[in-house]
Amino acid sequence: MRATVNQGRRSFLKAGAATGGGLVIGFHLPVAASAAEAAAGPAKLNAYVKVGTDNRVTFVCGQVEMGQGVHNGLAMLLAEELEVDLRNLRIEQGGIDPAFGNPRYIGFKAVGGFQATGGSSSIRNFGNKVRHAGAAARFMLISAGAERMQVLRSECIAENGHVVHKPSGRKVTYGAVANDAARQVAPDEPALKQPSEFKIVGKATPRQDIPLKVTGRAVYGLDVKRPGMLVATVARCPVFGGKVTSFNAEKSLRVPGVKKVVQISSGVAVVADSFWAAKKGRDALEVTWDEGPLAKVSSADMYSQWAALAKGPTAAERLKTGDVAAALAGGAKRVEAVYELPFLAHACMEPMNATAHFKGDSCEIWASTQAQSWNQHAVAQATGLPPKAVTVHTTYLGGGFGRRLESDYVVEAAETSRAAGNVPVKVVWTREDDIQHDFYRPASHNVLQAALGPDGMPTAWRHRIVGTSILQYFKTFGHFLRKDGHDPTSTQGAGDYFPYDIPNVLVDYVNNNQGVPSGFWRSVGNTQNGFILESFVDELAHAAGKDPYQYRRQLFGKPHAARLRAVLDLAAEKAGWGKPLPAGVHRGIAAHFAYGGYCAQVAEVSVARDGKVKVHRVVAAIDSGWVVNPDTVAAQVEGAIYYGLNAALYGEVTIRNGRVEQSNFNDYKMARMDEMPKVEVHILQGKGEQGGAGEPGTNPISPAVCNAIFAATGKRIRKLPIKPEMLRT
């Protein structure tokens, strides 16, 4: 992937011809810098690099920072190629720019053009682009430095923010030649460093955003302040898809601080001079709702319907090899199981919020968003403005996990600003709003069947998935939803990468979404299917009377599963698989591939007589290709384990009468600090294509824990979350 940098004349002529000779947005063309331009700010060498006369280098990053460390990781790649001290490099959040468009989709199929952060794709998608940008800028700076010193370019090198003339030792700072460098023609294919030359990449490096967050200087969406800004809360129908029939704002307007009460597409917004006034005004609001056709939807009915559909004759095929029916009929032993998983909320620590200022012919947005370009188009569609009239300013994100790929909360802010009289308005969600009006991780009912041969190894594998669909709601990728109902996000991890060496396999899917909004949740379909596959394989191992670790080693026989087998071996070795444990503590193991990352985990678990599960230790091994910052990779796996552990132990959203029954952390519980196990992360420096690190660690934890519970109790967990009543003795 080539960086979007200053182009040579030949490339520019080709690009101009391809676009009809119009402006090539995102490219900084070589023009003379005026004195005014030089005084106005740093010289922009390309979409990613600016160099100030004070020798300060600014890295402009189009990806967003939501705690995953991507700003620092990409900055390390830039600093490495540009030959600057990372401490002297300032990171700036980029606006919407085609230069920052994703070159491929972050999940299941290649598309491109949009600007969004997710799918563990930032380093994978932009690492090479940023490296090329840094190398091109280095070339331009060296050329400018050589001209300034009136020496041969071939005799100069870049070193620690300087252009150095090697024979004489003379040098000039980048800042001194930055404006001259901006007039240079960038190479089409700048030479990149070899890994043996790396000074920064591959070393544990402190992140620049951490001090900002610790000291409170980091600006999140909730921190945004604008002159004359008001604050709003929105009353939304408690039933999915419901609408306002009428409302009475008389009592709300009596609340001190309440300025206006206005109707928007999602409900009724109470606009005030503070959040507390807006909330009290919303509490006093009288609204009559048309609850619509979903008012009778319930979780119990959904699971019953899914169980019936699972027995039906038709489904959308995702993976089919061999003759499964014949192999099941002829197996020496047959194993069957049903697995169910619930809806899950995202529960980001920073609830949804956005600030908007609609100005009639334009709109400015300030938001903690994962998807700037989608927000731009959603606001444009809602307001009737052209997309170029919508500006999106991205703040730090207090958690994303896929929830902030949606645009609902941003559109609410734009509509409220417009309805309130074109004033800046910050719309703030409460925790109850956040949990009860989410786009939930899909729920599913899964029927599995396997046949074992005389040697105990599986000869057939049958997996039918019935459940809700993300792409029915996420219309941006709706074209990936097949006519037969197949949603690739629902079979992700079950059919797109099937690691087991089994000759006869059938994975199919029945799409049945009764109106519960579904959305991307950290690691998407892998979080469900990773649990199901690795739990059922554990069942097969025990049915065969074999060690679960060795059984997996044998099953991971396909060529593409070699790296998965390697992390399985590493996790087992570091955990001391097969060695004695303290009394009452048992091990479980699991491994899964997702988003280019291979991860295996061993969990050490005990179960009390009252059914309370205690996870004492988790040993994780990950291979996500060559690593930029090992400290960040380890942190991401640790965070993923916590997120996945919450889902295993507590996560459950239930629906009754079209309403979410949970509302806050009292009934949508999160693991407390004393429940977090000791986590060890071992990084296997892979030699394959670079993979993701933020999501692969979410998937093995729940099966590893449940497999350990079986080892401890003989009871198999096939329905999450794990509840004490399942395990009481």
Image (cartoon, grey):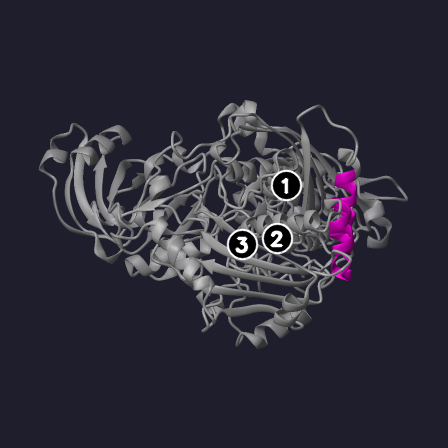
Cβ–Cβ under 8 Å for marks 2 and 3: no
* Spot occupied by residue 445 in the image (x, y as percentages of width and height): 47, 55
Q: Give the camera-side residue of 27 and 177.
A: 27
Q: Is 550 located above or below residue 328 in the figure?
A: above
Q: Earlier in the sequence, mark 1 or mark 2?
A: 2
Q: Is residue 238 left or right of residue 552?
A: left
Q: Find disc 2 in the rendering and name its residue.
A: 533
Q: Check if residue 87 falls in the magenta segment.
A: no
Considering the whole magenta stretch, tell me its main secondary structure.
helix
Question: Which amino acid type corresponds to the residue marked 1 in the rendered image?
Answer: Asn
Q: Look at 40% across and 55% down and name the residue there.
A: 376
Q: Earlier in the sequence, mark 2 or mark 3?
A: 3
Picture disc at residue 525:
3
Q: Give the camera-side residue of 377 and 706.
A: 706
Query: Bounds of the magenta span?
Result: 549-572
Residue at mark 2 to residue at mark 3: CA–CA distance: 12 Å
Q: Earlier in the sequence, mark 1 or mark 3?
A: 3
Q: Give the camera-side residue of 194 and 610.
A: 610
Question: Which amino acid type corresponds to the residue marked 2 in the rendered image?
Answer: Leu
Q: Find disc 1 in the rendering and name its residue.
A: 707
Closer mark to the observer between disc 1 and disc 2: 1
Which residue lies most toward the right here?
Answer: 167
Q: Residues within 10 Å of mark 3 (few under 14, many from 20)?
A: many
Regarding residue 690, the answer to whether it shows in the image is: yes
* Spot occupied by residue 361 in the image (x, y as percentages of width and height): 29, 56
Residue at mark 1 to residue at mark 3: CA–CA distance: 20 Å
* Spot occupied by residue 481 in the image (x, y as percentages of width and height): 47, 67
Picture disc at residue 79:
none
Q: Is residue 404 left or right of residue 603?
A: left
Disc 3 on helix, strand or loop? helix
Question: Which amino acid type corresponds to the residue marked 3 in the rendered image?
Answer: Gly
Residue at mark 1 to residue at mark 2: CA–CA distance: 12 Å
